[in-house]
Image (cartoon, grey):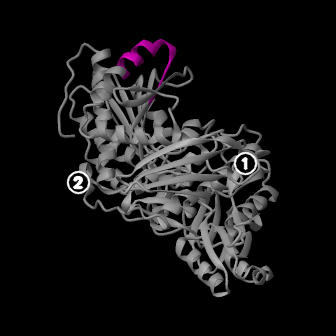
Amino acid sequence: MLGSNAMLPVYEHALALTSTQLLFDPRLSQWVHKEVEVWLFEGVQARQRLASMLEQRGMRAKVRSAYKPLLCTFLEDVDASNLVSVHIEYPVHISADPRRFLLEGYPLDGVMPGVALSWVAQRDVVATAQPAYQVTLTDRSGASQNYSVLAPNVLKNDATLGVQALCPTGYLRVTDPVSQKVIYAESFQTEFEQVFQRIMHWVSQHPWGDAEPYFERLVLRVELPGAETVDAQGQLILSTYEALHEDLYFAVLEFFQLYSKRPVGDRGLQAGQIVPDIRVGRDQVRIMIHKYPVDAVLPALEKECAPDCKNVTDSLNSCQAPISATQVSHVLKTIEAQAFEFQSRQGRVVDGLHRPGTLPAIVVTGGQHANEASGVVGALRGARWLATQPQAHFAVVPLENPDGYALFAQYRSIHPQHMHHAARYTGLGDDLEYREQAPWFEAEGRRRAIALTGAQLHLSLHGYPAHEWTRPLTGYVPRGFSSWSIPKGFFLIVRYQASFKALAVQWLEALTEELSQVPGLADFNQRQMMRYESYAGSGDFDVKHGIACMLSQNDRQNVGVKLVTEFPDETIYGAAFEFAHYVQTETVRLAATHWWRLNSPVKVYSVTGI
């Protein structure tokens, strides 16, 4: 079902930019010599151009960011070079998470290194008025400056879930410069908000039929100007393009969950592959929706991102970017074991290996969620280490979801640092672990690995966002994933069957104790955990030897103990990626070693330098 055929859009629309429309607003003539402030979702240069045009017409103008206004104020208007401290009182709104506006400040500490930053919640809970931060800056001389940063929001009705959500919005405020009295103020829908509403309206009105999947692929193409900012090291810290991708993907997924009469969050839904395609545009906004019917031939969004690691068989341990599916297969061929393979929904190969041995069996998998690439390399490196242990019995499926992985590679060619959650699930649109019935396609790889080994330990290597995850058009904090909104270091999730509880607890204690000695990991986790707690508070997890852990019983799983690793790897490169798959690999080695020690009297072999 792969190819390059073109298909006419089933929906197409163009929108004028809010900034362009504002320049034709007849009210401007009434505001000459007044202070005019506008909040938009465009980038800093576009907003500065609009402010200049308004000033040419006789107004004092400032055009601010509607997305993360506090952070953007510090990035654009505050000179932190002479500051010693910043104190911020953040608003609390009755219709939002109490820490919502604190989260919107992330990662302010990172853009002001060496400046003491403190936060406190405002006493008065906001109900209807526009929320605002109260900021106090103190410089090296001891002088202080106080000012307010407005964060325009509006309560929107979410038609999909039938709930209200407090969302950032466009805003206009006109002030008399002499009296400082607000003459006029209104919130309004920007083109950024209109794009989302138009697409969701089309999705809700389209006749989808009764049978899953409803399409082979649904491409939501949007071209628009927006805002994207990187820090001094070139790392992404905010992007309206990424935010629109996340909101569209998950909102459409939520719609189909309800349309199919499933609960919200159901991962077994096979709607088809939902593909937001958000591009940097100019001058206007274009929307095009392409619906590919079931079994259609699918074109690529873009040529897949070429991996930096060429001779990956030799340089796997030091690769600094996600590797290709072809490279995964090449590495597997270098490991002495019995190969097996299956096909994905879209016809790609799912490769696996099985090697019998006398030690208790272990299954290692990666790439279940295909935008979590460090686990793919970690599974391969872990398999190479297991193959050096003479008595090890193991199976490995390093890339479980090749359809999502191909989409991920295409996405990276467009936006290299985005999270790309639309590549998370399979070509059918489901999470392969939750597949409910045959045909099993890619899910057959894991099923075969467990059947061949009879393993009671499954190591499933995962990742999660390496920077902030937001959904500004549906309430900012990602619904159902609020505890994943910012990174909290490398952590572990352990699920066990009831009869394995005591073993799982003992094994996890030994594993985390040794993992805490992995070079660099303790410092990495401490830094990320401190930042997480600063913005999100304490999480619903235990911390063992500096590693966050979640332990729970699951008698429905098909192994006695399942370990899910979580490294913040969406999407990182260079030394950060190399460190991520090193930690994943060390976890495989240490998890296997302690499993053998607890379950077998046979001598456990171990080597270094994996």
The quadrant in which residue 223 appears is bottom right
Tell me where residue 197 appears, x and y as whole percent: 74, 61
Q: Nearer the viewer, residue 57 or 516?
A: 57
Q: Amino acid at mark 1?
A: Ala
Separation of residues labelled 2 and 1 (CA atoms): 48 Å
Tell me where residue 75 appears, x and y as whole percent: 47, 63
Main secondary-structure element of the magenta-colored stretch? helix
Is residue 495 magenta-colored?
A: yes
Disc 2 vs disc 1: Cβ atoms closer than 8 Å? Answer: no
Q: Amino acid at mark 2?
A: Ser
Tell me where residue 204 appears, x and y as whole percent: 79, 55
**Mark 2 element type:** helix
**Looking at the image, which residue sits at the far left?**
608
Residue occupying image coordinates x 56% and y 77%: 48
Label total for image: 2
Residue occupying image coordinates x 25% and y 59%: 311
Q: Which residues are magenta?
A: 493-508
Visible residue check, residue 254: yes
Residue occupying image coordinates x 77% and y 49%: 128
Quarter of the picture containing the N terminus is: bottom right
Residue 315, disc: 2
Q: Nearer the viewer, residue 377 or 546?
A: 546
The quadrant in which residue 585 appears is top left
In the drawing, does residue 136 fall left or right of residue 519? right
